[in-house]
Amino acid sequence: MEIKKKTIVGVSKFIIKSLIMGLLVLFALALIACGIVFGIMTLLPSEVVGWGADSVCYLGYVAHCSFTPFSTLILFGMTLGGFLMLIPLYRYFRKKIHAIKEHGSLLESILHE
């Protein structure tokens, strides 16, 4: 009975932690994708996009965003933050996959934690 309870608790903790880590991976990927797309979009002239700022940006042309060089740097910084979030998440999942390969099954790797 004790082994069964330990198994259920271990599996439920593993599932919850894996779901949280998976959501963090999706969040990091969304940061990367949005940062790149919107960072490039802020550099486009208003004539190309069809709508945008009416005033001249700090680079000297009418861009999609009047705060252009700074907003682009902020968005590319957000992209860098997404990449930096992925590094520990990659290490976590690599460690879990290695544990599964070492123990032969997912359940055995959970019980040996």
Image: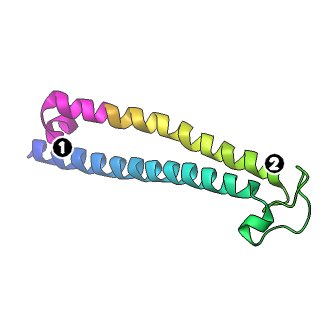
Q: Secondary structure at mark 2?
A: helix
Horizontal side, residue 27 vs residue 77: left or right? left
Is residue 9 a member of the stretch shown in magenta? no
Horizontal side, residue 105 vs residue 79: left or right? left
Q: Work out how far the residue at label 2 is from the one at label 1, CA to CA, in angstroms.
A: 55 Å
Residue 113 appearing in the image: no
> Residue at 90% across / 51% down in the picture?
58
Q: Does residue 99 lie above or below 5 as drawn?
A: above
Horizontal side, residue 70 vs residue 95: left or right? right
Question: Residue 11, image x and y in percent?
Answer: 22, 47
> Residue at 12% across / 33% down in the picture?
104
Quadrant of res 54 = bottom right
Q: Residues within 10 Å of mark 1 (few under 14, many from 20)?
A: few
The furthest residue to the top: 102
What kind of residue is marked 1?
A: Lys
Q: Please, what is the dominant secondary structure of the magenta stretch?
A: helix
Could you say which disc has been placed on residue 99 in the image? Answer: none
The residue pinned by badge 1 equals: 6
Residue 104 appearing in the image: yes
Quarter the C terminus occupies: top left
Is residue 99 a member of the stretch shown in magenta? yes
Quadrant of res 63 = bottom right
The furthest residue to the bottom: 51
> Residue at 57% across / 51% down in the picture?
31
Q: Residues within 10 Å of mark 2 (few under 14, many from 20)?
A: some
Horizontal side, residue 31 vs residue 111: left or right? right
Query: Comparing marks 2 and 1, which lies closer to the viewer?
Result: 2
Residues in magenta? 95-113
Q: Does residue 38 lie above or below 54 as drawn?
A: above
The residue pinned by badge 2 equals: 69
The furthest residue to the left: 1
Taking depth in this image into account, of 8 and 70 the one nearest to the observer is 70
